[in-house]
Every structure is written in structure tokens, then in C-alpha cells.
Amino acid sequence: MVVSVDLSLVVFGLISALAVICGLVHLALRHGSALAWLAATMVCVSVETLVIRYAAQTSWGIAAVSLLLPSAYLCASQAIRFSMGMAATRPRLVVVFAALIALSLLFLAMGAPTLLQTLPFQFAGIVVFLDAVLALAKHKDRGLLGNGLLVLCFGSLAGIAIRMPMFPLLLGEPAPFPIMATDTFERVFLNGLSVLTSGLAVLVIARIVANEIAIHRDRSERDGLTGLLNRRTFDEWVDKPTPASGVAVMCDIDHFKSINDRFGHHVGDEVLRSFARLLQDYSDQAGRVGGEEFALLLFDVSLDEARAQAETIRSRFHQLRHPDIAEAVPFSASFGVAEFQDGRPLREAMQRADKALYTAKQDGRNRVCLAPGARPFRDSSQRAA
């Protein structure tokens, strides 16, 4: 017993399944426009497959293909762009895209030859897709998945370019270049491009999943308010042997509770974010280790250099102003500084820096103090709040 299977229906089923998966994941994540665009791409491709298989020789079928095929390329280009963190297609290019589709529909209404009618909408799809591929090629941080996506995109473009003059075969019309029979053309190009489309979809999904993993990892490691390392992640750094010598800095915003009490928590949050931005200017290893308490790790710097950097942060923060806080209430912060040596855990240095921070607060706040036993320094700019 021989069972015949319509390959078009198989392709339709596979691509439709991908569309459903993309849609469900998009709804589960409650965000991620790349998945929504990818689901739209799969819907366009699956419907187009059925139309070409069962209604390609009707006027409405040709009109549907004239809309579905370029729309699939537009949606795919947006999915690629958003999955790589790039901007959407430029509006001017979208206008050109729409004009080419309108030209194809006009040629169809005028009864123009099939080749002339199909070229504009195919070119419309190539224009927007090529624009996304070129943007992807210029992207500096593609990574392995991005490089694989780029290779498949160029493969798809090559197939599309070869298919353009032969496209009338898919609509049951003779092609101007009768190189191969219709069934061979469908088997080689239509199904080959369907495989490439599925491969593109899988890589885009993989890229989106990788992005989501990176986002969740970042959220687990970062403080939600300031964007600095959170206490748990910073403690992991502290408990590791250090790769180089340097200086640990503990710092605390002076009288922060009074800022919250007098001006509201929204102002307090803005003050915390402002202070965190100052810390990020000096080291990626900056963490929020308490409500208004922060820590900073400076590698390969001397004690004098670290003290000078802490003094610069203190001075810059002291000069900040907030529109909701009167001029008579300047910000200030206190700092404790301690050296550490490479190959040893940072915990001891952090404890000594914390003692120096306590000394700074006892001595009047708004100052930088070295840990006990460290070489003293002169700083005439330190002053009490």
C-alpha cells in the first residue's frame, strides 16, 4: 500500500507549528517583539505555501501571494533586527516597500505578463530583507548565533535572487528561461527556501532565548534600583582569591534616612541612582551592599590613586543638587579605603575598609579615611558635612 503525502501540506504544518510556538513563547514572556514578528513571518509563509499549492492560477491567489511573500520578508527582517537589539526598518524604506507591492497589484489589474507582475513584489521583499542583513553584517556583537544567522540570511538572499525570474513557474505560468521543469523547480527552490526559512526561525528563537537568559542572569546579579552588583553577587567576588592587587572602598551616603523622611522615597531613590552612576564611572565591580551602603573594587591601583578616586567621587557627589532639595542641604558621603594583595580573599580588606568608613563617620562624615595601619596622606579638601 502506497501512501502519498503532499509535501506542501508537510511544509505548511511545520511552519505553522513554528508560528504557534513563537506566539505561545511571546505570550508567556509577555514581551519580546522579535517573537511576535517571527510568528507573523511564519503565518505569512505557511498561508503563502497553501495559496501557491492550491490557488496559484487564480487572480485572487496571485494577489494574495503578492502581499504575503513580501510581508513575510518584512516581518522576518524585523524579527532579525529586534532579536539582535537593532532598530526597526527605516520608514522611508517601508514606503518604498509598499509602493513596489502596489505596483505589482497594479500590473496584475492591468493584465501585465506574469514575470512583470511578480518582479516588483519580489524586489520589495529583497529590499527590506537585504537592509536587515546588511545591518546584521555591520553589527559588532553578533556572537556565534548572530554569525550563523548571517550565513543563513545570505543563503536565503541567494536563493531568492535565483528564484526571481523563475517565479512564474510557481503560479502555473511559463518562465522566460525554461531551464527546468515546474516540479523540479518547486522541489529544489521552494522546499529549499522553506528549509532555510525554518533554519532562520530556529536561530532567531535561539538568539531570543539567549537574550532572555542574559536578561534574567543580569537581573539575578544586579540591584534593581541602581544597576550595580547586588549583595549576593558582590559577596561572591569578595570570597574569591583576587586576580590582582588593588584597593577596596566602602562608602555610605551620609544622613540618607533624613533625605527619605524629609523629601520622600522617590527623591531618595534618585539620590541612590545618582551616587551609583558616579561609582560606575570608576569600576565595573561596584556593588550596593546595603540600603545606602556601597562597595567598590579597584584593581591594579595604588593606595594613593584609590584615595584620589574616592575623593573625586566624594567631591562630585557633594556638588550634586536635586530640584526638590533646598540648596542648604548638600549631599555628602563617607569613604573607607583598604589595600588588598593578589591571590588572597577580599573579605579581610573589605572588613578593614568598613572600619575606616566607620572612622570617617565618627570624624564628621563627608571624608575619605584609610584603614588602620595604612600609610597616612594629606588632604586639605576633606571637610565635615
Image: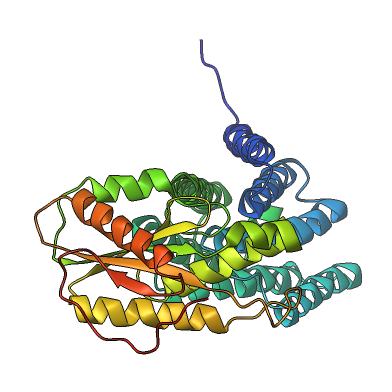
- The x, y position of residue 257, in whole percent, is 62, 56
Task: Give the residue displayed 79% in from the left and 73% down from the top.
Answer: 98
Asked if 313 appears above or below 258 in the picture, the reply is below
273 lies left or right of 384: right
Q: Can residue 286 be seen by looking at this rendering?
A: no
Seen in the picture, residue 378 relative to 68 is either above or below; the reply is below
Which of 343/136 is in front? Answer: 343
What number of labels is visible? 0
Q: Residue 324: percent from the left, percent from the top?
A: 76, 73
Closer to the camera, 276 or 67? 276
Measuring 26% from the left and 86% from the top, which residue is drawn there? 378
Indicate the colouring scheme: rainbow
Q: Nearer the viewer, residue 82 or 263?
A: 263
Q: Position of residue 299 (x, y in %)?
A: 21, 69
Whether 26 is drawn above or below 329: the answer is above
Q: Position of residue 115 (x, y in %)?
A: 70, 70
Instruction: Using residue 176 as the reference point, say whether residue 264 is left or right of it.
Output: right
| Residue at the farthest bottom position | 380
Which residue occupies 44% across, 66% down?
Answer: 154
